[in-house]
């Protein structure tokens, strides 16, 4: 529908709610709510696509004048024609049940004569289109549930005719729209509970398995199904766990592996996968058990030598990197990452200097951090990763076509990787790492101190604002961490480690630069003591105690 058609559109008058004097206030409130819902829909027209096919994408080129005109239309148009009351709702539901039953009977009676049940199928399809009107009345959702509409609709997801299944998906997508459900808390709760009770995710996944995305309508059906799942995850945290149990994670990984050109559905799949893995260790473990780490690495391998062709494809790549980082939060997945040669792939990405370099740096940071990053740290040195990481440490890349990582984020990840290696590497790998700091007349020590002063200045500036605002201790510490203290702690940790482990020339160079800048060792010692007292929750208590003692010993030697 173009803008002209939208402006000429008049809502159907068939289902007008009878106006009575007693109901005037009700009518006004209903009209307001309808306008809010319509306004939300008009706003969404200028947002992200809701369909993978160009013919149904929103009008991205819409001008501000046209948008204002649409909103004006929404504000002024009489909406009570679309308003729906209990009687009208029951009438729609009864009509749906009749047509659904008639279609089922005709199919059973004439299974081999499609022409005999075709009319009943067309009628059922029309009824499903009409039922989209129900999405404008979320307050009546508890009644819909009471009338057993949910199981009847979910039954149609398995209908032999995929057109009926796709129309049902479209209806469910409208009924679960977050903007609409936010209008009624009671309606939301009733609908979500009913959908969960009837295994909605499992039924949606079964339908996804049979849809053919080369057919435009069915590709739209896949997109709308993913939209339903996204809506549900926003409204109920329970869905995230249920989704994996009911087969969604397996389907998402299978869809990622499909060898086809980039499309909007693949992007949406990566977004849903990212949602499922966020803050959920059970789902992360499940992904690892389904060979999901290998799947993510295979998908990312393409971007080793190719940059994404569009901003949407770039978003897909970022989502895949985020999914991988999230997965590496659980220990078994780090082992799978190591065996799947994830380190080698990330190292190659850093060397190729494509856009994927930013994501690979973040993944390496996750894979090598903490006590569980030991194997990955040693392996990274073995595959000559030091040759890749130290040039990035010496000079933060300036020419970044799509600046995904800021300079500060880049420096934080690089310092975190080097600090993790100093913490976890032993034997010859550790010697190779420490000897890097004596190369080229200690240039890396000079760079360390340059970063120390850069982030010290940032933290001192933050400290001044905290003193003015008089914030409590915990929030002040978090603010300082975000403002540069975390990177400063990493830099100073590297300083005390290499001074203790390397030749005395490293310590002499550190002292020389500190004296030149009029600074003292006390600052670094103070930062390290504060770091030792706030190690966070990584590793078990025993590891944290050992690490704390190790840092304090380094400070004493320093």
Image (tube, rainbow, N blue to C red):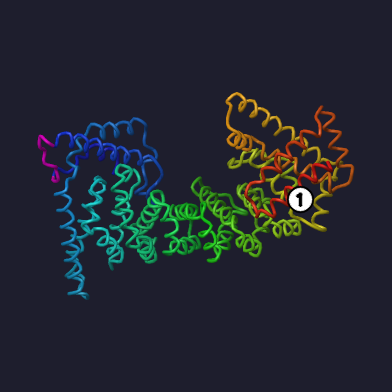
Q: Position of residue 431 (x, y in %)?
A: 83, 54
Q: Is residue 184 left or right of residue 425?
A: left
For this rendering, which residue is in front, 334 or 540? 540
Instruction: From the viewer's perspective, tell me whether residue 532 is left or right of residue 134.
Output: right
Closer to the camera in the image, 169 or 547? 547
Q: Main secondary structure of the magenta part?
A: loop
Of residues 29 and 315, which is closer to you in this image? 29
Q: Is residue 275 left or right of residue 179?
A: right
- The local secondary structure at tag 1 comes to helix
Q: How many discs mark residues in the rendered view?
A: 1
User: Could you say where residue 448 lies in the image, as x and y percent from the top left?
Assistant: 77, 39
Q: Quadrant of the N terminus?
A: top left
Q: Is residue 16 covered in magenta?
A: yes
Stretch in magenta = 14-22
Q: Is residue 390 above or below residue 212?
A: above
Indicate yes or no whether the magenta region holds residue 456: no
State the residue at coordinates (18%, 39%).
Answer: 80
Up the image or down, 408 lies above or below 198; here it is above
Mark 1 is surrounded, within 10 Å at the Cα level, by few (under 14), some (14 to 19) or many (20 or more) other residues, namely many
Residue occupied by mark 1 = 422
């Amino acid at each position: 529908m173009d803008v002209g058609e939208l402006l000429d559109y008049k809502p159907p008058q068939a289902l007008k709610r009878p106006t009575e004097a007693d109901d005037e206030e009700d009518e006004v409130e209903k009209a307001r709510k309808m306008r809010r819902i319509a306004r939300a829909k008009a706003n969404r027209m200028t947002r992200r696509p809701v369909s993978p096919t160009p013919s149904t994408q929103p009008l991205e080129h819409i001008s501000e004048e046209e948008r204002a005109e649409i909103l004006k239309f929404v504000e002024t148009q009489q909406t009570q024609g679309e308003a729906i009351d209990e009687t009208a709702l029951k009438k729609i539901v009864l009509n749906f049940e009749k047509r659904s039953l008639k279609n089922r009977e005709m199919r059973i009676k004439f299974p081999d004569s499609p022409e005999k049940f075709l009319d009943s199928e067309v009628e059922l399809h029309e009824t499903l289109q009409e039922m989209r009107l129900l999405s404008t009345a979320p307050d009546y959702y508890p009644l819909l549930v009471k009338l057993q509409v949910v199981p009847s609709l979910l039954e149609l997801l398995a209908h032999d005719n995929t057109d009926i299944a796709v129309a049902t998906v479209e209806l469910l997508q409208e009924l679960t729209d977050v903007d609409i459900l936010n209008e009624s808390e009671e309606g939301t709760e009733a609908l979500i509970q009913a959908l969960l009770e009837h295994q909605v995710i499992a039924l949606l996944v079964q339908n996804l398995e049979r849809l053919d995305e080369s057919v435009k309508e069915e590709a739209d059906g896949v997109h709308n199904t993913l939209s339903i799942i996204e809506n549900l995850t926003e409204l109920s945290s329970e869905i995230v766990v249920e989704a994996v149990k009911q087969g969604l994670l397996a389907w998402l990984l299978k869809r990622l592996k499909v060898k086809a050109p980039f499309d909007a559905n693949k992007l949406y799949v990566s977004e849903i996968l990212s949602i499922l893995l966020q803050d959920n260790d059970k789902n992360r473990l499940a992904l690892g058990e389904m060979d999901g780490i290998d799947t993510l690495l295979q998908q990312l391998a393409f971007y080793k030598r190719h940059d994404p062709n569009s901003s949407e494809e770039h978003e897909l790549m970022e989502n895949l990197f985020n999914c991988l980082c999230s997965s590496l939060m659980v220990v078994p997945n780090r082992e799978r990452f190591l065996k799947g040669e994830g380190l080698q792939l990330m190292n190659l990405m850093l060397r190729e200097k494509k856009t994927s370099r930013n994501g690979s740096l973040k993944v390496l940071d996750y894979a090598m951090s903490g006590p569980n990053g030991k194997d990955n740290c040693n392996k990274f040195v073995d595959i000559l990763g030091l040759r890749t990481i130290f040039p990035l440490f010496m000079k933060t890349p300036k020419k970044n076509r799509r600046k995904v990582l800021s300079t500060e984020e880049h420096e934080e990840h690089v310092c975190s990787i080097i600090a993790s290696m100093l913490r976890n590497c032993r034997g010859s790998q550790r010697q190779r790492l420490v000897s890097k700091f004596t190369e080229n007349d200690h240039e890396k020590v000079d760079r360390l101190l340059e970063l120390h002063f850069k982030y010290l200045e940032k933290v001192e500036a933050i400290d001044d604002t905290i003193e003015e605002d008089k914030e409590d201790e915990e929030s002040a510490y978090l603010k300082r961490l975000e403002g540069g203290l975390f990177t400063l702690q990493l830099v100073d940790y590297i300083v005390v480690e290499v001074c203790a482990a390397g030749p005395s020339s490293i310590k002499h160079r550190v002292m020389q630069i500190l004296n030149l800048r009029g600074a003292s060792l006390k600052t670094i010692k103070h930062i390290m003591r504060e770091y030792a007292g706030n190690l966070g929750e990584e590793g078990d208590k025993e590891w944290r105690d050992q690490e704390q003692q190790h840092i304090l010993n380094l400070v004493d030697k320093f």
